[in-house]
Amino acid sequence: MNARANRASRANKARTKKKSVIVEVHNVGVCYRQRTGVLRYQKFWGLEDVSFEIRAGETLGIIGANGAGKSTLLRLLARVTEPDRGRIVWRRNMTSSLLALNVGFRPELSGRNNAIISGLLLGLKLKEITGLLDKIRDFSELGDFFDQPAGTYSTGMRARLGFAVAIHADRDLLLIDEVLGVGDESFRLKSQQAMREKIRGDKTVVLVSHSMEAIRELCDRVIWIDKGRSVGSGDANQVIEAYSGAVREAVKQLILEARRKNAAAGGAALK
Amino acid sequence: MNLVAPSVPCRRARVRTATPLRARRAGSGPVLLFNGRARFNRSTAASPCRRLRRLWFNTRVLAESGRDRMEYRELVLYGVYTDLRTEVARRFLGFAWWILEPVMYMAVFYAVFGLGLRQGGADYVPFLLTGMVAWKWFDGSVRQASNSILANTSLIQQIFVPKYVFGLIQILTNTFKFLLVLLLLLGFLVITGRRPSLEWFSLLPVLLVQFLLIVSLGLLLGAVIPFMHDLKMLVDNALMLMMFMSGIFFDAKSLSGAASTLFRLNPMVPLIEAHRAVLLHNAWPHWGDLGYVVLVSLPMLAGALLLLRYFERQYPKLIY
């Protein structure tokens, strides 16, 4: 009950704060080329028709089944690819980046060097990133390991380093793909805390997750994508309920189908 | 909550009026963040026609890409630095391999051509070495640059980085190692009795021309290969053929007639001759021949940059 009241107040605040639109996505589709044989290709629309908008300062959740096109959509928002149809309208001078852990990672080099590489890749200047190094070291809790070769890190330590760099590189739009479960319990709490601070601050966040818990807790609005199309959008709770309902319905259908098949097979066997 | 039909015309009308016609005509993609008066940039459907227009008619694209290049300079330089550091850290003997490896490589060819096939005369060793050092720079750089986009697949799919950056990092890393070997070669030549003269300074323009050729061919191949991985096989063998047809093991001047003309189309032939003229004969390089190399390189470079820019955001979808 309390949580619901909280959300309601947050929604109210959102409505009164008047948020400006920073990204508009209009009927966007992305086409991949699939090889089907020698010199033969087939088009495959990974994303067919998606429309929504992102407002400054909000946290937008994206939900949908596997293969619905969520990651493709994130790539579009990170400007790694361009839409093959439809269009995206950006606010001027906007920066966005995927929270990508450990891209360009060199196990032979120290955590410090790796932090610099990641920072440069995320579009920071060398000066900016060297100024942030101490903060990154503290946040990632690596201590003396920070100057050891990153290859000697545990998986959790690597993820922590990556997360620390990404959260310190100040992008206008932060795109997160299922990485909330980074590191051990204490670091997970800390990273969620940092995320929430980003969310409360001026940062705009797009979050893709299969965890309805996380979405419910962190997002103001949710977009539901099904088979490359945006099917619903709106208040987090309502969309999640509709989505869960649809999933339950689909599973029920599957079970019925299976039963029918079983029955038919059984009948055939009896004859 | 609104369960919407797939197409939501979200505030399209307002945006239309808010965007000046000029900005809309430019059809600017996400890279063009400079429309002074426009409130929005748009990345529209990437129809070829529109993208071509974007390339040719918006002169500010070029200015912007120039600034772009400055922005990514740090990334390129730091990439080269980490590449070199990684190599040192990975190997037991560290950077000794930057010298050992080319020495071993050249020893093999000396064994085959100098001792085995009994090529050349007394001066064969410096003759061979000069050619091999220049060739190895070209070969290593082009090979790695042509593979650079494919080698960074996972990075390219997650972060936007201009694709020329990867090729340039490979080329510069190789260039650094080449300069070390070149110093070694110069030392060797001086020890074996060659005397440096004023002409040795003309090695600098020769190196610059060769660098231009390397960048042009390397980036061009790097831009094309993601579309046709098959080409990689071709490139490997074409480079090997080119090695034997560049006059490294014999003097290109010993050929005559039609064979010679055909032979000299290979831009590495005049370059290696220039290296030898300067270092072995204390003569000026043949400037006309170097001009030919520049003429061959520039269209390739322009093609490479246009391709890379045109397909900048297509590569992440092509490779996996």
Image (cartoon, coloured by chain):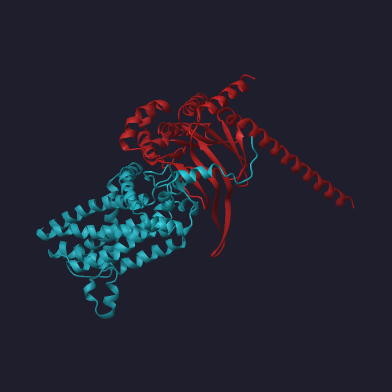
Chain colours: A red, B cyan
Q: Is residue A126 above or below residue B56?
A: above
**Res. A190 visible in picture:** yes
Q: Quadrant of the N terminus of chain B?
A: top right
> In the depicted view, which residue is nearer to us: A171 or B21?
B21
Q: Which residue is at the far bottom?
A: B257
* Horizontal relation, residue A260 to residue B16: left or right: right
Q: Which percent across, then down, holds residue A160?
A: 45, 31
Residue at the outermost top position: A2
- Residue B146, x across and y down, in percent: 38, 57
Expressed as whole percent of the image width and height from the top left, the position of residue A7 reads 59, 24
Q: Is residue B157 above or below residue B146?
A: above
Judged left or right of residue B85, residue A247 is right
Q: Residue visible at 23% across and 61% down?
A: B129
Rendered image quadrant of residue A38: bottom right
In the rendering, at what x and y percent does residue B96 appear?
27, 47
Q: Is residue B158 visible?
A: no
**Which of the two residues, B303 or B225, is positioned nearer the viewer here?**
B303
